[in-house]
Image (cartoon, rainbow, N blue to C red):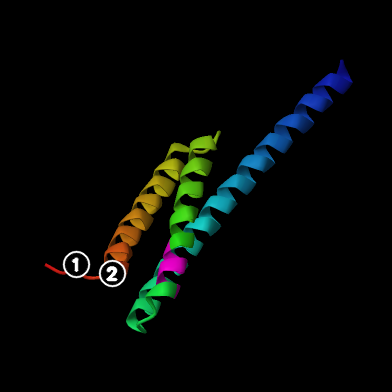
Amino acid sequence: MKSEKTLDVAVDQLLEDAEQRRLELVRADLDLCHTLAGVAETEIGLGDREHAARAFSRAARGYVEIHRLIEQGRGWDESVTNDLAEELANVRQELNRVQQLIQPPQNS
């Protein structure tokens, strides 16, 4: 009986650690998405739309992955989840803005 309780405690600790790592990964990925969007904007300013498009594409893929990780998060405080959702929305706005810069002008 004691070994079962010890095992349960160990499993609970592993699950808690896994969720903490997931949270750290989400935060790091959010920072990376902001950085890649900034790189894309800089490349646009330098006139290199190809590199801008590649950086943007990586940031957009990161956004999708972050969204998936947030949905999988368990046991996070509501305030943490709300903060992540707000930051994810900020990334989406930044990506939308940069995407408009990357798209070539439409000829009328």
Residue type beneath disc 2: Leu
- Relative to 36, is 2 above or below? above
Residue at (41, 68) in percent of width and height:
53
Q: Residue furthest bottom?
A: 46
Residue 15, given in percent of the width and then of the height, sits at: 68, 35
Residue 98 sits in quarter: bottom left
Q: Nearer the viewer, residue 49 or 18?
A: 49
Total numbered labels: 2
19 horizontally vs 14: left or right: left
> In the rendered image of this protein, does residue 73 appear above or below residue 41?
above
| Residue at figure coordinates x 40%, y 51% from the top left | 88
| Residue that mark 1 sits on | 106
Q: Residue at x 39, y 53 (%)?
A: 87
**Magenta stretch: dominant SS?**
helix
Give the residue type that dot 1 points to: Gln
Q: CA distance from mark 2 to mark 1?
A: 12 Å
Q: Crowding at label 1, few (<14), some or many (≥20) Cα neighbours within 10 Å?
A: few
Q: Which residue is mark 2?
A: 101
Q: Position of residue 89 (x, y in %)?
A: 34, 51
Mark 2: give few (<14), some (14-19) or many (20+) Cα within 10 Å: some
Quarter that holds the C terminus: bottom left
Q: What percent of the width, then of the height, locates residue 11?
A: 75, 30
Q: Earlier in the sequence, mark 2 or mark 1?
A: 2
Q: What residue range appears in magenta?
A: 51-56
Left or right side of 29 for 17: right
